Image (cartoon, rainbow, N blue to C red):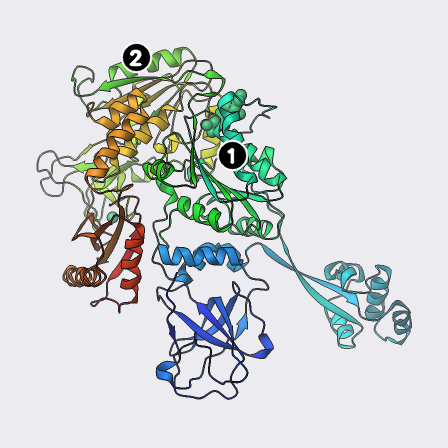
Amino acid sequence: MTKFQTKNLFAEETVEPPCRHIIRVAFASAVDTEFDYGVPDEIWPIQIGQRVEVPFGRKNKLQIGFCVDVVVRRPDTSTALSSVRSDKGRKFKLKTVISVIDKEPLLNAELMDLARWISGYYVCPLGQVLAAMVPAAVKKGAGVKTLQYVYLTIDAAEAENKIDELRGKKQKHIIKQLLERQALDPDSAVELQGVVDVVGCGREPLKRLAEKQLLKIAHKTILKSLPVIPEGISAKPEGHILLNEDQRKALESIKAQIDSDKFGVTLLYGVTDSGKTELYIRAIKKVLQNGKSAIVLLPEIALTAQTVQRFNERFEKIAVMHSGLTAAQRNVQWQKIKSGEAQVVIGARSAVFAPLANLGLIVIDEEHEPSYKQDTAPRYNGRDVAIKRAQLANAHCILGSATPSLEMLTNCQSKRHFTLLNLPRRVMNLPMPQMRLVDLRQGDITQKGMNLISEPLARQLTETIAKKEQAILLLNRRGYSNFVFCPSCKHTLHCRNCDVTLTFHKSKAPRYKRMRTVTGEHMNYGYAICHYCLAQTLVPEKCPLCGKGFAMIGLGSQRLEEELARKFPDARISRIDSDSMASKNYYRLLQDFGEGRIDVLAGTQILAKGLHFPNVTLVGIISADTCLYLPDFRANERTFQLISQVAGRAGRSAKKGTVFVQTFLANQPAIRFAVAGDFDGFVREELKHRKACNLPPFWRLAVVGLRDTDFDKLDAACKQMRYKIDRIIEREALEVTVRGPMPAVISRIQRFHRMQIIIQAPEATTIQRLFSRLRAEPPIRPAVKVAIDIDPINLL
Ligand code: ADP
Ligand code: ZN
């Protein structure tokens, strides 16, 4: 639970008379404190979860915050309740609330509890958590139209009489109109615009009638109707699917859990195409039958037309939330959920906060996905928050994955609420694709020069294209090359702001062609871009240090596309990644591929996720090593997941699929096990290693990241932070290992130097204790930016 600290900014004056009601307000600022305000009787009541406007700070600037607690002052005392602490026991004047913003609370009691838990667990100010839980579009009221309505405030007979008394012709006409339309009370009010159009008048006569109290003008807000189901690939109606034996058993177990109305988690471990999604749909049907609602979380990338359509076809009252929506669409969807009009929500990470009442089930597909972790405050993991929310709501939770996270697998063994279910076969008994390892160290396989496609893969590709089947090639790197490098003087282009090399992107825009800088140098046909801060520069044709030509080395999906075009001039090739995906072209490209107008689709990991194309029989992983080089303890796990996921794209029909895995590290266990399709073997091996190093899932991790543009200042702050942490550990006798301060792997981003202190503890509660103490301490000096990451997804 959050530790409340109450401050009041004006301690001098005495209240006269004191407000009877006091609320506690949390702001979306980094200040980890909540503030108390008095509520004038005129605007009482205020409920928890509503936003209010209040004066804040020394200058009393108006600010908006969430009401997070309500206390009533006892009439017999003029002092506040014990929970409101006055400064040094003196009487003080509370500032008062100016206005209430929301008609109804934006968050219900259950979501408020969830917010408090997140604030405590992820060490984040409550106000920031609340701000993150309600979409900005909702707070702004995007897509809301205000319409004016009119109705008579007198009865029909009286109105008839008034018509004769009135002088203005227009006014008479208006009353007649309203009588005709039977607009005699607020419920039967008619749209003002309609009346104005028929009468042919301005607003003036209406205003005058309102002044005479003959009619009233009312405002109503309505939501624009904005459909969100993406157009594009239209899913074919699935017809009636008969579950197979494994699916039936799994569904039985899940249904029993749902009917128990108790909290529980099912980890559904099933290979790609084993029919997990079908089970989610059946489980949701069951929940709806029981009169409850459900949330489905998908990684953003999987929220393509394909998946959304599939759910949309099976459920009527569905709302969709993902980053592709406009602000107005987002608000409309949210309001649909809030009003109960939608009972199934499908969305990305933040949909876990969907304001559904009566929640019965949360499904988290691809539970192992790192994208469920938010990388700005609050740094929550959508999966873990979903489990917590299910617990608070006594709901069931289904986690699905073909490669479950080690954390959840371990939970299934050690925690009472967790059940592991297995779907070991593909539906319709489709065979698993054949996996082929291409060891790139054996030089004769690759030809000389920069070839991304090995000889065996090239042969298979030719065959696939000849058979009119399709292929997916994956290269987990955007751009053309990840180094711009001078071979003669070894000068490499680095980002000015970050400690990384720049990636060269070829440009199709002719304006870059042979451009000259002010100094008259020729430029290369493209630009170098930093993938961290997005800074771009043109690349000179010649190295500025030695005057020789630059070379672009390393791998990139653009280079792959070029090599494909050279080697397979007759094939229809397209590239898909976030660079070529700036627009809706993404859906069109997938549709073209789905309908066979593209032979080979090359791209980054966006291709690995959840797409279903029956005619794909070949998948090539150009470099299985890209993740392994990351200096992170989850590198093996990511590599295994990537290979298995991409492999899952091959052979999703009766045609047999083949997967080529190209690697320089053929002996790496992650690659060996993935090629053998041996998940259990991989898990055993990896767990041994994690255990030996006190890493998750055995121990818990937290990272305190500190950053500043001034290195000396940062260094001093880091030392102080370490000192504080050490003192708390000593005082509380906590079992914790602390490492650092040390530079982060990418030691500078956007001009900020980055240091980290890594904390390991055998129990989550130990980490919680440590941080709740640290939170209560005064901030470190010199002040630098501090980010606390609990259960970090990587250590970069
Ligand atoms: P997963 O989510 O595990 O990848 P899906 O549920 O998407 O698997 O199933 C893959 C495909 O097989 C879908 O097109 C689905 O409609 C179909 N399918 C699922 N279960 C069955 C079944 N028992 N019999 C036939 N087809 C099925
Ligand atoms: Zn940069």
Q: Secondary structure at mark 2?
A: helix
Above or below, comparing residue 715 to residue 366 in the picture: below
Q: Quadrant of residue 690?
A: top left
Q: Is residue 612 left or right of residue 168?
A: left
Above or below, comparing residue 205 to residue 135 in the picture: below
Q: Position of residue 74 (x, y in %)?
A: 53, 80
Of tags 2 and 1, the one toward the viewer is 1
Quadrant housing the C terminus: top left
Q: Determine if residue 480 is in view.
A: no
Q: Tag 2: residue type? A: Arg
Q: CA distance from mark 2 to mark 1?
A: 46 Å
Above or below, comparing residue 275 to residue 391 in the picture: above
Near mark 2 (Cα within 10 A), the count class, few <14, some 14-19 or many ≥20, is few
Q: Position of residue 100 (x, y in %)?
A: 55, 70
Q: Which mark is residue 459?
A: 2
Near mark 1 (Cα within 10 A), the count class, few <14, some 14-19 or many ≥20, is many
Q: Which mark is residue 254?
A: 1
Comparing 179 with 155, the one in front is 155
Q: Position of residue 121 (x, y in %)?
A: 36, 55
